[in-house]
Image: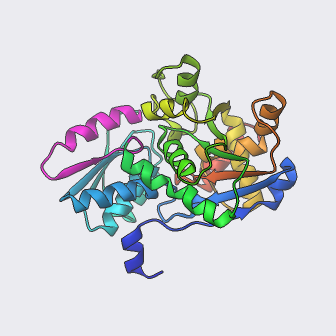
Amino acid sequence: MNSHDLKSKLHLQTPTVLSPSISKLTGFSVYLKLENIQIPGSFKIRGIGNLCQKAKESGCKRIVCASGGNAGLAAAYAAQQLDLPATIVLPTSTPQFVADKLKENFSAEVLYHGSMWDESNKYALELAKAPDCVYIHPFDHPDIWEGHSTIITESSAQLGFKPDLVVTCCGGGGLMNGLLQGMWKEGWNDVPLLVMETDGANSLNAAVKANKLVTLPGITSVAKCLGACTVSATSLEYCSKHKVISSVVDDKEAVSACLRFADDHRMLVEPACGATLAAVYSGVIEKLQKGGELGPIKSVLVVVCGGSGISLNELQKWKEQFSL
């Protein structure tokens, strides 16, 4: 693929691979959709790239995005490839190396505002009121969901069969919404979607239990990229249209999954992705089967969403923090 192709498409077609080690552990075939190898580091480039492309076609001259890291990196990369300037607003909790990537790799203007994403987002909305600016939401936009739906389109073609379960995680709900749209397009309507969160960043789980949107008082999990205090209204609506199982693990299980995945597959992912991987590493699927929420399983598709909020240093700190 040459540089012109990259600019015209923005996201890569990522491989879907069988994990022998995780399959042996679980007793069923586990296939990994490796979104962690996207150039900006996560699946986010699919949806945000789609939104940015459409914005430029509509006459946009600058993009503004609030992000805890991954959405900002995707927006900055997309803007760079589309020859648009980008302003990325970060909460103060964002790791310094993510801010450095935004500036040094993708030439973005970086501003800090607020300790949580919701505060950064309000500021970004104000900035985007300037002429010819377009606000890029990290997860709550139909063009974003449309972009993320291509994960399933690709996976379906690569697998050649329908899995018995799809596993993902939820921050604000953009990935979940896109995956469900892709599953419906591919005729996977009867395939359950297991959506993982960490305790302290569990806005979907809280909403499902209350049967209404719930705003968390704050994000206390180390999985900061699952840190939207309120999930997308569309995500909660989709839970009534499809078999969505919401499950929560603790930070220790998410970090443990990151460490085990690094050993098994020699790749680093952040704790938000670790929450997804905990479904297979911590026996969540087996527990759901024993509880009657899931039936027999022969194959599972796990969306390895990736994330740039991780380094060997950070992982080592968490390893020590949780005595792993």
Asked which quadrant contains residue 223, the reply is top right
Task: Tell me if 199 is positioned left or right of 86 in this view.
Answer: right
Classify 166 as above or below 76: above
Q: Nearer the viewer, residue 221 or 6?
A: 6
Which span is picked out in magenta?
Answer: 116-140
Q: Indicate how the structure is coloured in the image.
A: rainbow
Task: Tell me if 320 is positioned left or right of 270 in this view.
Answer: right
Q: Is residue 44 visible?
A: no
Task: Tell me if 119 is positioned left or right of 268 in this view.
Answer: left
Classify 123 as above or below 52: above
Q: Nearer the viewer, residue 123 or 75?
A: 75
Task: Tell me if 134 is positioned left or right of 149 in this view.
Answer: left
Q: Position of residue 299 (x, y in %)?
A: 77, 52
Give the quadrant of the C terminus.
Answer: top right
Residue located 44% across and 34% down the image:
234
Residue located 25% across and 39% down the image:
125
Residue located 43% across and 52% down the image:
146
Q: Position of residue 220 (x, y in %)?
A: 55, 28
Q: Is residue 253 visible?
A: yes
Residue lying at the far top of the rendered structure: 210
Q: Nearer the viewer, residue 157 or 224?
A: 157
Residue lying at the far left of the rendered structure: 131
Q: Position of residue 100 (x, y in %)?
A: 41, 57
